[in-house]
Amino acid sequence: MTTYDKLMAHARETAALGQIAGRLGWDQETMMPCGAARQRGAEMAAIEAVLHARRSDPQVGDWLETAEAIDEQGQAQLREIRRAYERATKVPADLAKRIAQVTSEAQGKWAAARAAEDVAAFLPVLQEVVALKREEGAALADGGDLYDAMLRDYEPGTTAAQIADIFDAMRPRLVDLRAAALDRPVPAGVSGTFDEAAQMRLSQELATTFGYDLSRGRVDKAVHPFSSGSGDDVRITTRTSATDPFNCFYSTIHEVGHAAYEQGIDATYALTPLGQGVSMGVHESQSRIYENQIGRSRAFTGWLFGRMRDVFGDFGINDADAFYAAVNRVDNGYIRTEADEVQYNLHIMLRFDLERALMAGDLLVTDLEAAWNDRFLADFGYAVDTPSNGCLQDVHWSVGLFGYFPTYALGNVYAGCLYQALRKAVPDLETQLAKGVTSGATGWLRDTVQQHGGLLLPRDLIRRAGGIEPTETPLLDYLEEKFSALYGL
Amino acid sequence: MTTYDKLMAHARETAALGQIAGRLGWDQETMMPCGAARQRGAEMAAIEAVLHARRSDPQVGDWLETAEAIDEQGQAQLREIRRAYERATKVPADLAKRIAQVTSEAQGKWAAARAAEDVAAFLPVLQEVVALKREEGAALADGGDLYDAMLRDYEPGTTAAQIADIFDAMRPRLVDLRAAALDRPVPAGVSGTFDEAAQMRLSQELATTFGYDLSRGRVDKAVHPFSSGSGDDVRITTRTSATDPFNCFYSTIHEVGHAAYEQGIDATYALTPLGQGVSMGVHESQSRIYENQIGRSRAFTGWLFGRMRDVFGDFGINDADAFYAAVNRVDNGYIRTEADEVQYNLHIMLRFDLERALMAGDLLVTDLEAAWNDRFLADFGYAVDTPSNGCLQDVHWSVGLFGYFPTYALGNVYAGCLYQALRKAVPDLETQLAKGVTSGATGWLRDTVQQHGGLLLPRDLIRRAGGIEPTETPLLDYLEEKFSALYGL
């Protein structure tokens, strides 16, 4: 065995154990009895300790010094193994343990503070989290930019400056588009109640329609929809609401986008470092293009309108155009996770700028609420009413997830680039979607993006697939064209 | 930290990882997509490798040499850690690997041979399994009895000679009882079809009735019912058949017995070597006493008859006595898993004698079928018709599970001892059971058996709980009394 082979054998076993940890996470959100939470905490800690020990194994460090790859794939494997090794070894064990403890505690305090609308109750522990994450960032950065070092966990090969360039260019056009759309009457939505079992059945149908392979996956309910797992075991969850079937269907399509990425990866990468999506941003590009550019298109919604009429009968919307308008409503709202295609990115940019300032030490935790509220007023045109609609709405910072937020909007930017290329590559795309056929779109995405798994770094992958340097222009052009037509702007 | 504390910290993490492996097994039988089987194989191999490395860690061996326990509980913890360490280190790695490979292959060949009714097709690989297991037994036995060494995996502290004494005393009385009952008319069974969703709902009710804590467990369907997990996450499965509701209900009660044992263990033992049932035999004593002595009693079946009438209406049985006879039918049959209380033990004794002879080298694999058929004719009074009804019916030997079969009947023997003591301890037991109240019985079992987890070795545990040396007499007295009354013998 060569050193490379030894490293890969070790990495394969680590990848298999990583899949197990992921499956436990799925179980926790879908199947686990409520009384098992504390025991599960100990079980998760045990498998995480095993994973950490494997990733930081000095043997891996030694092997990495001499391992040689014979091709592009091998080099990418080594790149990912090295990234995991450095991530695991650069942060002192004491600091990692302290972060785990404080973020665990912070989540509880965040939930309580949000419920009580009491920002002050959350600030002390958030202050601790910020201080610890800055310390961790410094350890990871090795003298380089602290926030860039954090980004490496979620979007390797991309810098905060690159993201800031894109976001800064997006903001004025999105603020204008939002204001213009909100100036027009809000389209009618659905009315009545929708059988939840029927929603789940139509969800399964939608998943299959979008190419999700149910022989290597399954659909369950969870409070917060997610996709989980890689290779031959990629599971999704969705949720139902008796009065809001779109929440169910578009959650399903979104998660199918994530799952299709994982299911579409070259089978030879299975249970290796390349056998999973390369970044959060690219992952989100797949979920978003399935959900929005395809799933909320005029063509596809025409087909979905028919299926919903078949299943639910009359539901207060009488033609396909009104249905299209209803699934693309732009309306005032405070909550990121409920935002439409236009306003979603404004939410993300707000968080990106604030968390970058927190990490740089330019914004104090005590000034966070005021900074949030000022920025929200500037971009959305009205004031935050309560903290749970403002700076207490997301769990992310309490968990220590700094560097994660921007990948959501980056995913939309990537989706814009990909969709532009897809329309050229599949000229009859709309004709297909109008019949509920997504194979032209999903096949192209599999070939250009999904199959590569972790082979190419995000920006390289999008450049190759989209044919252009990753840029916000296609997304903004798409949004302006779509919503100008919808709102008669 | 003392050496004992270090050993325990290590053991706790191993126990947590063991729970994870168990949960994966549950997932595989209940939730896993069919296309994920190969990947799951790699995942299971990875976690098993981690567990084996931990159990055989030389550090554990060093600690065991000097660790000192301060009390009975600590001594039992060390006993269990030592047993796992010796199990993991005495068998050479090459041999363990070869056994894993050959038994994996043998299961496939067994299934094919059973489907084709072709014993000869199974014999070569069974021969390999037997040879490898004998080699493993020799490694484990350290010059002692080979089969005793195998028993240690399933029934620590019990010898084959002790089991043989019990079984030899049981056989003639059971053969006679069987023949006498079969000489009488077979009672009528249920007729019609039974809604399977309603069966699952009544199963949940039965589980709760028997004290199963659903906040720390759940009930799902599986092809072969089982119980899985320890502590705060103990899950059971059952199955439904439209024409045979008893299969569902008694599978549920049986698995609830296993689960109640795990759920009833002293919480301070959770995620330690003592935090699980001490042996297969004691486990089976709990599942069997729930299922048979309690669940198939005249008193409890009277209550169940009422509940089934409530749920299913008329199902061809018109009074509680006929119902009691129907759930206790003794009928000719070849299959162990479908056998009644009387005949079940005859099935086990047959397998025990044959597998002991195989391991001792006194029976050749090529003579197995003839030996099986001769013994079956002698004990059951009629001849095996096809191999799938004879020596090909069980998966156990193909998996290399030698030493496992006797624990089924040992469980019945233990259940007999416990039931005799329970009736004395809870004088109004029948009055309670007639109202569907099991708390008197299950509370006594929790106090005398379940809470102790792995603290006491099986025979010591049964002796303390039952107040007598473990013996077949109470079981045989109970069976003769019950079936004599039922069949007018």
Image (cartoon, coloured by chain):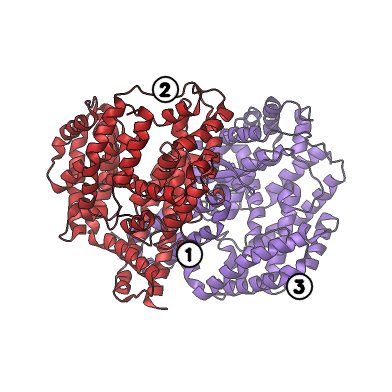
Chain colours: A purple, B red
Instruction: Say which residue label 2 marks.
Output: B188
Residue B120 versus residue B392: which sits nearer the camera?
B392
Tell me the distance, in whole angstroms, between the alpha carbons under discs 1 and 2.
48 Å
Task: Give the class, few, some or many, for how many residues have Cα within 10 Å of label 1's Cα (few <14, many ≥20).
Answer: few
Looking at the image, the residue that sits furthest to the bottom is: B1
Q: Would you name the residue on which mark 1 appears? A: B268
The residue at which mark 3 appears reads as: A366
Where disc 3 sits, the SS reads helix
Q: Position of residue A156 (x, y in %)?
A: 55, 60
Left or right: residue A353 compared with residue B99: right
Q: Which quadrant of the rendered structure holds the N terminus of chain A?
A: bottom left
Q: Residue A369: x, y in percent?
A: 78, 66
Residue at 81%, 57% in the rendered image: A379
* Residue B177 visible from this viewpoint: yes
Which secondary structure, mark 1? helix
Choose the circle earlier in sequence order: 1 or 2: 2
